[in-house]
Structure formats: C-alpha cells, structure tokens
Image (cartoon, helix red, strand yellow):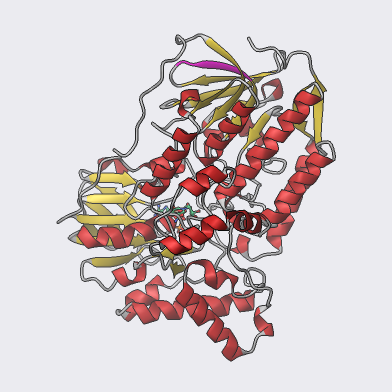
Amino acid sequence: MDDEVEVQPRPGAGETQYIDALVIGAGFGGMYMLHRLRERQLTVRGIEAGGDVGGTWYWNRYPGARCDVMSIDYSYSFSDEIQQEWTWSERFAEGQEIRAYQRFVADKLDLRRDIQFNTRAQSVAYDDAKQRWIVETDRGDRFEAIYCIMATGPLSVPKDVDIPGVETFDGQIYLSGKWPHEAVDFKGLRVGVVGTGSSGIQIVPVVAEDAQELFVFQRTPSFSMPMRNGPIDADYMAQVKANYPALRAAAKSSYSGGVRSISSRPFFSVPVAEREELLQDAWRRGALALMGTFSDLLSNAAANEIVAEFVRGKIDEVVEDPETAERLKPRGYPIFARRPVLDTNYYEAFNRPNVKLVDCLTDPIAEITPTGIRTNARRIDLDIIILATGYDGLTGAMLAVEMTGRGGRRLKDKWAAGSKSYLGLAMEGFPNLFIIAGANGPSAFANFVILNEQNAEWILDCIDYMRAHDLTTIEATTAAETEWMAAVSSLAQTSLIPRANTWYTGANIPGKPRVFGIYTGGFNRYREICAQVASEGYRGFTFEPGQKAAKTG
Ligand code: NAP
C-alpha cells in the first residue's frame, strides 16, 4: 500500500459537531478548499470516503493509470513553495506519482488533522429554521454546518455494471475506478478488458505484457493519439520552475486552463499540402497537439471528418491485421466529441499474438458466465475480467447522497430531468451549498486542478463577502440558474460535441436524462463570468441577512 492513514479520533458517535464549514471529499478540490477555509479561522472539517487524500486518484490504481494533462499543468498553482519543492519526473505523471504529490501537499499543509477518512456522507439536509446543513455519515457522525461544500468530483461513482450474470463469475473481477491497493498478477492468465475509453486504453498495453491472453471487448472505438510521454529532464524542470508565474497566468487565461497551443487558423483556410504537414507534425508531437492544429475542428464537420480520417489512417499504419485495424477505427461520431484519449502503445498492442479484439458492435456481450464472457456468437473463457466501463459522470456523486434543500426538496427531484445549477457552483433551493467542479461548469473541458482552485477561491471570496456584510445565506435564483443552463446548452449546440454519446450528456448510463452538462465556452471565459458575477455583488444570487450564522454550537 502506498498510502493509508490512521483514522483520527472522533467525538462520540451521535454527538453533533457544530462547525462553520464541512468539505465533503478530499481530492484536489476538497484539499485546497479545506486549506483556504482554515486560513480564515473558520471551524472546518473534511470527510472523505477513501483512506487518504486523493479523490479519484485514490481509487484509480489500475495498471497504466496516468493523467492525460501535463504534470506541470496538473498541479496546484496557489503556492510557490509547493511548486518549487515538487519535481515531476514525467511529462504525464503516473497515478502513483500524483498520489505521492497529493500526500506531499497534505503533509505540507497539515491537512489530515481536519479530515476524517473512511467516512462517507449519507444524508445532506438543509434545516430551514437553523439555516444549517445537517450531514450524517455512514459512521454515525452528525455535523451541523453553515456552509457545505461538495468536493465529490465529476468522475467518482463508477457506472453500475449493466452486464447480466456478473455475480456468477468464478474468476477475479475488477472495476478500473475501484482498483485494489494490492498489485494484481496477470501472468499466465486469460484476461478480458471491457471498455475502450481513457481507462481501458491505458490498461490494455500494460496488461498485454503479462497476460497469457488478453481479450479487448470494444463497443464504441475511441480516437486515441500517442501521448509521447517521457521523463522530464532537469534543465526543463528548472526552466519551468523559473517560469511558473508566467506559465500559470497563461494557463488561467486559456480555453483549457492549461498550457496547450490552439491555432487560430480555420482548417479550410490552409492549403491541402500544408494541412497534411501540420497534421503529421502534430501527430509526431503527440498528446493533444492534433486537437489544436486548427481553430474549428469542433465546429466544422467537414474539417473534423478529414482529421478523423487522418487518425484512421494512423491506425492502419500501426495495426498489422487489416480486419483488426478496420474494427478499431471509430466511425459515426466526430473526433474530439468524446474525450480525446492519449495512449502509449495501445494500437501496437493489437500486433501481439496474445491480444485479441472482440468487436461488441457486431457481436455484443450477452452475459458474464461462471467461466468468462459470452457474446452473441461465442464463449470466451477468462480468469480475470476488468470492467473499464466508465462513470456516472457529473451527477453520480451528488445523487449518491440523500440530499434535500430548502423545504425538504430532494436533489433527485430537482435533477429528475437532468442537472441544473448556476455556474456549476450553486443551486436554487440549496442555500450555502457550494459545488467544486460541479455539473454545468467547465468540468472535463478544463484542467481539473486549476478549475478546482478557481472554484474554491470563488467560494472563499463569497463567504468573505457574506461575513463582511453580515449575510447568513446565499442562494442562486431560479432565473439565474435557468439563464445559465440555457447558455450551457446553446454553447454546446454550436459545437459538434453533443453529436457523440458520452458521459458529458449522460448517454453512457441507461435511463439517465440527457442534458449536456458541461460549459464549453472555455475556462478563461468561465473565470471571467464568475469574477463578474462576484464583482456585481453576486448577480443572480439572493442573500438572507443573518443573526444565526455567526453562532457555532
Ligand atoms: P468511458 O470513457 O465512459 O469509457 C467506458 C467504456 O466502457 C466505453 O468504451 C463504453 O462503450 C464501454 N462500456 C460501458 N458499458 C459497456 C457494456 N455494458 N458493454 C460493453 N462496453 C461497455 O470511461 P473511462 O474510460 O473510465 O473514462 C471516463 C473519463 O475519465 C474520461 O473521459 C476522462 O475524462 C477520465 N479519465 C482520464 C484519464 C486520464 O487522465 N488519462 C484516464 C481515465 C479516465 P460505449 O462508449 O459504447 O458505451
């Protein structure tokens, strides 16, 4: 185990803890929120379902887990001391290194003394009379807090297994998003990986090295691009450290919240031969370079299809068996409309004699049996099944707790037709409840760490404002929420993104209402809007003046 902390002593079960703020979740967002609230001398507690800090990285320990945002971007910017002391070893850090970084930050800021681990919020209920959030946990804790901050993450609840017979399997079965702490040995075994999104595509080449046979069950093929990962050399890291202020400023004023160049050239403004050169060069550079080669790849369907075909050609170049290559080629949705995947030797893995592609579009999985997976056409015996089948994204963690707002209104009812929020930060009917990296904010379209920081800072400023003006509660208005949701939806409609079935829209979960749940206007614009809302006295929010908020206990 590379992490696990002792469970701290708690007040007796059933005893209420009266605090100013409760932060639920100790991933990147929760850790930073807790730190900043503590600076204000507020009484603040964190609770976290995992055994240590880390959030999604705490659970995602599957082989090959790695971040697809560059390490130097995917790290806190708020403390120069932290960014000077920490040295990344690879361009794209492995999960284990990210967890080590998170533990380093937790130690540095002494965060754990205020976080209760192995504790899951079960109910989060607003008490109108007390103007407080009452939070009860699976370990019998009861908190009364003025502010409740949901830092539960957009990708923390794995999708329920929707393959019949899963409970009958006699071998070992693993979920990518809830991977055990112990290493799993694949040597000499027959392994099946179900799912070819970001997680499955990272798992396949690593497991292929050890497994006797590896069957990749692919339903929708992904467009994957070479990550071109590698060590960060000392000179480069020194340059980065010397230039962090400028790099962070550039990241924060960019569309994605990260340092990544995006061209301003529309695709068809460039002559054909030059276009081809630019695409080839982007492929050589790897990572998301291809996505940034032209300005309109997410809005111009014809340009998008040419780039999609370019990637299909790359699959042909790598995969030796033409039939396998053909089946690996994504069709029927625009490239970049699903989360672009970055890989190391994914397509190459299919040239190994022990790796077989099972095309579930033509031969769907019928069931899991005691001995393996049965598709409509065949039975495949397996010792291990890995389900890399994704997440109940954006809304899963919020709906996993029994949450009720003003007047006992359930979040499940408010979100019955899909998520609704204002700025992804707050909701009508749920006063003093803040969400970090919530549904309808920039979410997966932004660098999560920088988005988490921005959200936490906005929340902190808001709490400062309330305290300075003797205000007890803040609540989004229905009009502001409606207007924001209309903006999120209309922005999405101007792009090709909604044309794919993804967790962005809820389409990956059977029966989930379809709402395009991500603000696609860019992190830079989002940040400006949030700042403007605050500078206009929190436009779109109402406040209640207070007498009760100041009291703790
Ligand atoms: P995902 O992108 O939703 O992929 C899930 C895969 O499982 C899809 O290929 C899906 O096929 C397949 N699947 C689901 N149910 C199935 C079933 N019953 N039968 C057959 N196939 C099934 O999930 P993910 O790969 O975990 O990635 C989710 C998100 O996490 C990513 O978009 C990314 O934002 C983040 N992530 C990032 C990294 C990174 O930084 N490198 C790594 C992992 C994850 P269909 O599409 O046909 O449903």
Location of ligand 1 given as a quarter of the image: bottom left
Seen at 33% across and 43% down, the residue is 179
Residue 421 placed where, x, y %?
69, 40
Of residues 73 and 411, the one nearer the viewer is 73
Residue 225 placed where, x, y %?
45, 69
Of residues 116 and 77, the one nearer the viewer is 77
Residue 88 placed where, x, y %?
43, 53
Seen at 44% across and 30% down, the residue is 49
Task: Specify whether residue 215 is painted magenta.
Answer: no
- Extreme residue in the left direction: 188
The quadrant the C terminus occupies is: top right
Residue 408 placed where, x, y %?
67, 21
As drawn, is 56 to the left or to the right of 205? right
Seen at 41% across and 20% down, the residue is 8
The quadrant the N terminus occupies is: top left
Q: Is residue 275 above or below residue 409?
A: below
Q: Main secondary structure of the magenta part?
A: strand
Magenta range is 140-145
Seen at 37% across and 58% down, the residue is 202
Q: For residue 303, what is the image quadrant?
A: bottom right
As drawn, is 463 to the left or to the right of 308? right
Q: Is residue 167 above or below residue 445?
A: above
Q: Is residue 220 visible?
A: no
Task: Specify whether residue 144 is painted magenta.
Answer: yes
Q: Is residue 383 above or below residue 310?
A: above
